Image (tube, rainbow, N blue to C red):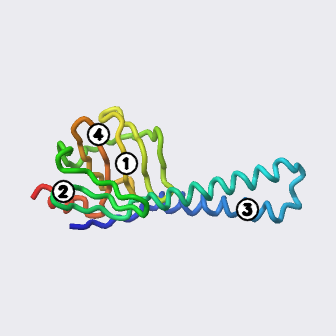
Amino acid sequence: MEFTLSRDKFSIIITSLVIAFAFGGVIAFYLGEFVIDNHAHFALLFSSILILILCIVFYLYRPLKYSIENGNIRISRMLGDKIILKDEIKAVRIPSKHDIAWPIRTFGNGGLFGYTGRYYTKQLGTMIWFCSRRNNFILIERKNKLPIVISPDEYKAFLKAYSV
């Protein structure tokens, strides 16, 4: 069974602004007549190219869809799916608002094509996010591993499908 996902407005805005900023830097480099310092001129190009590379990486690793296959949960991505085996799953549930309140991004992506990487909350500790939005959360608790958070569009249907 497959479940779609869509990005929230914040992610769409962040993605658009970062890409526009990066392309703007490359364009400014080639127009370059207004830059007084030559070192700043190349720093602008370097930082813009670095941002564009990060955009490509985050684009390729963004979650595309979630699926449930024989009790396993698959997070589909362009480069390498993440499969959570049913044997390592302890529980799948909707976290309370208190559990997921004020997440802190410790090592990850906070809006560029979604929300991926390591996050921390006081209630749950460190967790791994494969989300496209900041709501509709499903918490996948695993045995002896960090919990995983996903955000399918139809999160209640996902939970119901997994519990069957």
Residue that sits furthest to the left in the current view: 164
Residue on which the image places disc 4: 99
Q: Which mark is residue 87?
A: none
User: Which of the two marks, 3 or 4, is nearer to us in this view?
Assistant: 3
x, y percentage for residue 49? 67, 57
Q: Residue at x 18, y 50 (%)?
A: 86
Q: Quadrant of residue 6?
A: bottom left
Residue on which the image places disc 1: 129
Residue on which the image places disc 3: 26
Taking depth in this image into account, of 23 and 14 the one nearest to the observer is 23
In-image side of 119 versus 155 (left or right):
right
x, y percentage for residue 98? 29, 39
In-image side of 4 versus 29 (left or right):
left
Q: CA distance from mark 3 to mark 2?
A: 45 Å
Q: Quadrant of the N terminus?
A: bottom left
User: Which of the two marks, 3 or 2, is nearer to us in this view?
Assistant: 3
